[in-house]
Image (cartoon, rainbow, N blue to C red):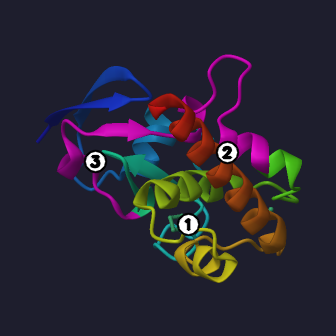
Amino acid sequence: MNHSISLTVNGARRDFVLDDPRVTLLDLLRERLHLTGTKKGCDRGQCGACTILVDGKRINSCLALAISHDGADILTIEGLARGDQLHPVQAAFIAHDGFQCGFCTPGQIMSAIGMIKEAQAGDDPERIRECMSGNLCRCGAYAGIVDAVRDAQGQMDESNQRRSA
Ligand code: FES
Ligand code: FES
């Protein structure tokens, strides 16, 4: 039996007909929309490579059934930059060498954006590490990742303050 769902993906509405209710958001993004920036690492919720934002919250898209998210607003790594202008978290990962092979990086960046929104880590490197602990990096780029997150968070705080001043 087919199921119809609609999602907003990086600002654009997308309609899908699912012929299998077990299709995950990860497979839908990668295989139907060819948004392959979201990576499939473990496919079982253990590595964080597939992290995206759904209605503003970070989730592992390999564990999320597409059919359960009808109507959701999805943001992936492809939706962050505005033309040539990178999102502050993307720019900070480059500035602080927050990656080596880059496989985990889209998930790290999306998780960092979600974490900054949650505002639960503050500027404490240990708390940031803990809040990002669902995102594994086999290259061990953790020091650069934490520096990047702290830097981006500081910049985003400053620009929010300027906007509200
Ligand atoms: S691919 Fe989803 S957590 Fe590893
Ligand atoms: S940069 Fe290679 S896995 Fe993280």
- Ligand 1 under 8 Å from disc 1 Cβ: yes
**Residue 65 horizontal side relative to residue 126, left or right:** left
Residue positioned 27% across, 29% down in the render? 16
Look at mark 3 in the image and give the residue it sits on.
66
Q: Nearest the camera: 55 or 154?
A: 154
Residue positioned 69% across, 61% down in the render? 150
Q: Which numbered mark, 1 or 3, is in the foreground of this view?
A: 1
Q: Amino acid at mark 2?
A: Gln
Q: Which numbered mark, 3 or 2, is in the foreground of this view?
A: 2
Could you tell me which secondary element the residue under label 2 belongs to? helix
Queried whether the magenta region covers residue 43, the answer comes back as no
Real-space CA distance between mark 1 and mark 3, rounded to the nearest whole angstrom: 18 Å
Could you tell me which secondary element the residue under label 3 belongs to? helix
Look at mark 1 in the image and give the residue it sits on.
48
To which quarter of the image does residue 135 belong? bottom right
Mark 2 neighbour density, 10 Å: few (under 14) some (14–19) many (20 or more): some
Q: Is residue 143 visible?
A: yes
Dots 1, 2 in contact, CB < 8 A: no
On the image, the x and y values in percent for residue 53 come to 42, 48
- Ligand 1 under 8 Å from disc 3 Cβ: no
To which quarter of the image does residue 64 belong? bottom left
Queried whether the magenta region covers residue 64, the answer comes back as yes
Look at mark 2 in the image and give the residue it sits on.
155
Task: Name, please, the residue furthest toward the top.
Answer: 83
Q: Which numbered mark, 1 or 2, is in the foreground of this view?
A: 2
Could you tell me which secondary element the residue under label 1 belongs to? loop
Q: Which mark is residue 79?
A: none
Magenta region, residue range: 63-92
Q: Amino acid at mark 3?
A: Ala
To which quarter of the image does residue 141 belong? bottom right
Dots 1, 3 in contact, CB < 8 A: no
Real-space CA distance between mark 1 and mark 2, rounded to the nearest whole angstrom: 25 Å
